[in-house]
Image (spheres, rainbow, N blue to C red):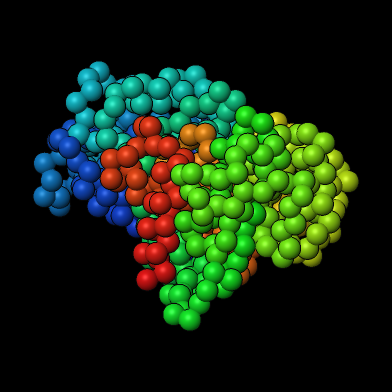
């Protein structure tokens, strides 16, 4: 299981472990693990080690001491930019400083000129960063980022909030790492919002702490194991009725494509029968996808089928009426796009949703989530896990808060961050496809929680597959996703 621990949880594990080990052991282990990572990354002799005032700086000093130690086979030329704080360092950091001072590393207090570093080790700040980087520290981070050299961040890229993935701001800066070696356990902020861009490749160094002995984490990374029980080869003796009906409700004038994309998402991920119930019907058939049955939303009765409601739906009286009827009914629901905006404008509809017994998945992007919560999208992005959990609990639904590192949360407070997907998905219509995939899995009998996890994982993996094949990220189109999702899904089911 890929657990994600927040700073309070990490501190508590650290506290327990430190009490059971000789002083300084954890920092020495952090230094050893980081040194191995540094050796793998070296792209030249010259190494710059940035050592800040706290224990993150202590880790960096351990790395410097080992890379430039008497026993090393490396011919590294190590420079330590040491930036001690006003208060005395912890005993373990003081010990690391003494070791680094006794090594061949040379110490400086301003950044040397030149840009030919074979590696930069970022040990400025870790999980103890308490406020935005300012003054000289800010200028240093900006200069380091402008050098464009390989950077190994220790624990967390300095300036990034390990809980939220936000650069600590307002208008903050953070180190852009090539790779982050994070200690004790993985952290949510490395995988969502700005975290993926700043952390680069993430490696976990457990420091000898047995994952089995850690308390349960508040969040985790999405992986097929979380929805694997629904992944089974199809029985020979099956028919289209075995895989459920999906009806996509949407498509106001000028937005007919959105429900078609959702319908294709549903079809290519295995729903038995797929309908589009259009608010403003424009075509009797989708010639590119004639399997999709076209209906008029005002007359359509979906029976027990799953409803995906919202793509391109608009905010007309008809749209409102159709949404109201859906909330009154007992069908499993996926609420997306305009359905979420209509919901945000109506506390009555929100109350009805919260009281439904049938499953519901909501797929807001950050602005839709902000409207539902009555805050700005900045507030939502500032703590994506909290926003997704709050929405899920208020509306008694599974919530997918979309964007880099989508967060899936449920009403009991569970939160999962999705690692698949890439910026190729930042294109109109990709969210519609996701909503359709969610509906498809619900229609095939998946529980809402697992349907959301599976759909988000497959949707992201489809985009990753397209990029690997050269069809993106630039210019990847939403219409390519359903076929790629089918390939991903079948590979999983096998
Ligand atoms: N303990 C252990 O067993 C282990 C710990 N480990 C390592 O320790 C790291 C946590 O260490 P930490 O708690 O010392 O915090 P850290 O991130 O170094 O920063 C705190 C310092 O920064 C300062 N400061 C904060 N914000 C600032 C700002 N904006 N601008 C300027 N200064 C600012 C703050 O000063 P103050 O706020 O008090 O003024 C304080 O001096 C963790 O990420 C991991 O790398 C590993 O070795 C594993 C074992
Ligand atoms: N940088 C990114 N990394 C991963 N996924 C992304 C990224 N940008 C967008 N996405 C995904 O793409 C989809 C976009 O959905 P949405 O914003 O609703 O767009 P639209 O309404 O145009 O379809 C979501 O699933 C979102 O998580
Ligand atoms: K750091």
The residue depicted at 43 percent of the width and 19 percent of the height is 139
The residue depicted at 51 percent of the width and 67 percent of the height is 226
**Residue 146 quadrant:** top left
Residue 295, given in percent of the width and then of the height, sits at 67, 49
Task: Determine the residue located farthest toward the bottom in the rendered image.
Answer: 237
Q: Nearer the viewer, residue 435 or 279?
A: 279
Give the position of the C terminus as an image quadrant: bottom left
Residue 457, given in percent of the width and then of the height, sits at 48, 55
Q: How many marks?
A: 0
The residue depicted at 82 percent of the width and 44 percent of the height is 321
**Residue 94 quadrant:** top left
Is residue 405 visible to us here? no
Residue 306, given in percent of the width and then of the height, sits at 66, 60
- In the rendered structure, the answer to whether residue 278 lies left or right of residue 165 reads right
Q: Nearer the viewer, residue 321 or 166?
A: 321
Query: Can you say whether 69 is above or below 305 in the image?
Result: above
Query: Can you say whether 476 is above or below 393 in the image?
Result: above
The residue depicted at 53 percent of the width and 38 percent of the height is 429
Is residue 469 visible to us here? yes
- In the rendered structure, the answer to whether residue 76 lies left or right of residue 169 reads left
Residue 182, given in percent of the width and then of the height, sits at 41, 51
Query: Can you say whether 88 is above or below 436 in the image?
Result: above
Query: Can you say whether 451 is above or below 68 in the image?
Result: below
């Amino acid at each position: 299981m890929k657990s994600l621990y927040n700073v309070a949880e990490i501190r508590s594990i650290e506290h327990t472990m430190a009490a059971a080990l000789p002083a300084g052991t954890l920092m020495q282990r952090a230094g050893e693990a980081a040194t191995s990572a540094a050796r793998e990354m070296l792209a030249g002799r010259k190494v710059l080690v940035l050592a800040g005032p706290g224990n993150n700086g202590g880790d960096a000093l351990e790395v410097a001491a080992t890379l430039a130690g008497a026993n090393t086979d490396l011919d590294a030329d190590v420079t330590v930019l040491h930036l001690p704080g006003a208060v005395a360092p912890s005993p373990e950091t003081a010990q690391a400083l003494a070791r680094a001072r006794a090594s061949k590393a040379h110490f400086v207090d301003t950044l040397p000129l030149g840009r030919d570093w074979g590696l930069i080790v970022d040990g400025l700040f870790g999980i103890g960063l308490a406020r935005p980087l300012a003054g000289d520290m800010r200028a240093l981070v900006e200069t380091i980022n402008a050098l464009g050299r390989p950077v190994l961040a220790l624990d967390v890229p300095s300036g990034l909030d390990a809980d939220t993935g936000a650069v600590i701001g307002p208008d903050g800066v953070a180190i852009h790492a090539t790779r982050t070696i994070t200690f004790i356990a993985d952290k949510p902020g490395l995988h969502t919002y700005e975290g993926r861009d700043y952390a680069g490749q993430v490696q976990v160094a457990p420091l000898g702490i047995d994952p089995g002995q850690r308390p349960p984490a508040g969040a985790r990374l999405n992986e097929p194991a979380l929805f694997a029980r629904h992944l089974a080869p199809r029985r020979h003796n099956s028919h289209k009725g075995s895989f459920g009906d999906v009806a996509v409700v949407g498509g106001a004038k000028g937005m007919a494509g959105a429900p078609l994309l959702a319908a294709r998402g549903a079809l290519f991920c295995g729903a038995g029968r797929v309908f589009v119930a259009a608010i403003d019907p424009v075509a009797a058939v989708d010639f590119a996808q004639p399997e999709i049955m076209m209906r008029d939303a005002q007359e359509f009765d979906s029976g027990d089928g799953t409803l995906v409601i919202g793509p391109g739906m608009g905010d007309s009286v008809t749209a409102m009426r159709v949404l109201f009827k859906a909330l009154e009914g007992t069908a499993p629901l996926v609420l997306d796009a305009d359905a979420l905006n209509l919901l945000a404008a109506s506390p009555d509809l929100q109350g009805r949703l919260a009281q439904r017994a049938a499953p519901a998945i909501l797929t807001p992007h950050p602005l839709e989530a902000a409207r539902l919560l009555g805050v700005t999208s900045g507030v939502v992005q500032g703590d994506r896990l909290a926003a997704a959990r709050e929405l899920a609990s208020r509306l008694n639904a599974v919530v997918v808060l979309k964007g880099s590192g989508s967060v899936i949360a449920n009403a009991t407070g569970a939160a999962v961050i999705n690692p698949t997907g890439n910026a190729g998905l930042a294109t109109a219509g990709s969210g519609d496809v996701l909503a359709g995939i969610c509906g498809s899995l619900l229609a095939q009998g998946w529980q809402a929680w697992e349907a959301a996890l599976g759909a988000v994982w497959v949707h992201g993996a489809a985009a990753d597959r397209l990029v690997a094949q050269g069809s993106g990220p630039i210019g990847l189109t939403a219409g390519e996703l359903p076929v790629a999702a089918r390939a991903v899904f079948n590979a999983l089911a096998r």
